[in-house]
Amino acid sequence: MQFITSRQNKAVKEVILLKDKKYRRKLRKFVTEGYRFLHEAVNSGAVIEHVFFSSDTAMEDRNELVERLGPEVRLYEIPHELFMQMAETDTPQGVLAVVRMPETELKTIFKEGFRGLVLDSIQDPGNAGTMIRTAHALGFDAVVATEGTVDLYNGKVLRSTMGSIFYIPVLENVKPEDIFALSREKSIRVISSRLENARPCQGVDLTGNFFIVVGNEGNGISEIFHEKSDEFVKIPMPGGAESLNAAVAASILMYESNRQQAAGL
């Protein structure tokens, strides 16, 4: 393990640069913080390049993680003050890592019975992370984010996924036109969520080969999804609320899909 004291060290500078989404996209890397998150990265087989430990971290926690890392992972110990400059959270656990983004292409995610979730210009990091986490939990095959959606590899989104980002294919900055092209090629239905001229979710077939599209928190789905979707779905709200939180809506629709599958509908 190498001991680093300078902010000018190349590995340290890379972590600081990766706080900016421009560099994350350019380098195809992101930063994770915390022991739980790193254990999830290891469990999933994610490619970890560097791991940094604050000098004040507990040796027992550090050794447990190091034992699970491959010999190709470069390990560094740094002073607490420098670690705080690299970390994003106010009370970090004293460990962070640089991880490569998986190289997943839209054309590779399809399989028979495919169920995908589309985040259409979702802006809130907590919503985006929760939607990824729920898609993973409920066995969906992929999460696809259109252009205009919050950066899915920023720290707030990552923390909201609770590690699910490592277990489900996630694609960013996808053009709606490409989603429709794949849908035509593979006979995948595009089912968009909206309130007007839509059928209750219990009456829409959500058992396979579809994308569910959930739109922006304030404006709903983009115009192209209004124009080209195969079906429109809504969630009945007998209590009379005007709308639901985007992540809650996505979760209900995905759970309804699981209910239908379990019932053999």
Image (cartoon, rainbow, N blue to C red):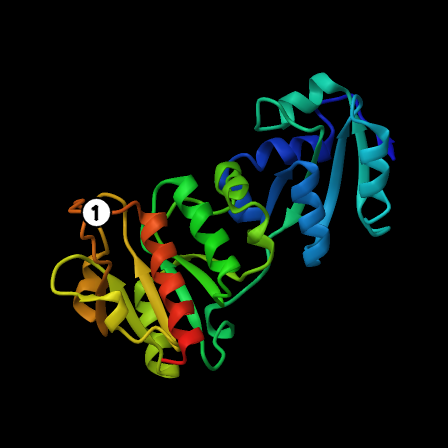
| Residue 264 against residue 216 in the figure, above or below | below
Q: Pinpoint residue 101: horizontal percent, then vertical percent.
A: 59, 53
Q: Quadrant of the N terminus?
A: top right
The residue at the far left in this view is 197
From the top left corner, tell me how far across and down residue 61 is, in percent: 80, 35
Q: Is residue 220 above or below residue 14?
A: below
The kind of residue tagged 1 is Ser
Q: Is 177 situated left or right of 145 in this image?
A: left
Q: On the rendered image, what quadrant is the C terminus found in?
A: bottom left
**Residue at horizontal 37%, vertical 40%?**
124
- Label 1 secondary element: loop
Q: Say whether residue 225 is left or right of residue 70.
A: left
Return the x and y of residue 78 as percentages of the image width and height.
78, 25
Q: Sort mark 1 into few (<14), some (14-19) or many (20+) by Cα contacts within 10 Å.
A: few
Quickly name the residue at label 1.
Answer: 243
Q: Position of residue 77 (x, y in %)?
A: 81, 29
Instruction: Tell me which residue sits at (83%, 52%) in the image.
Output: 70
Would you say residue 234 is visible in this rendering? yes
| Residue plotted at (56% across, 52% down) | 164
Asked whether the viewer can see residue 148, the reply is no
- Of residues 126 and 229, the one nearer the viewer is 126
Q: Nearer the viewer, residue 146 or 169?
A: 169
Relative depth, front residue between 23 and 114:
114
**At x 54% / y 44%, what residue is drawn?**
24
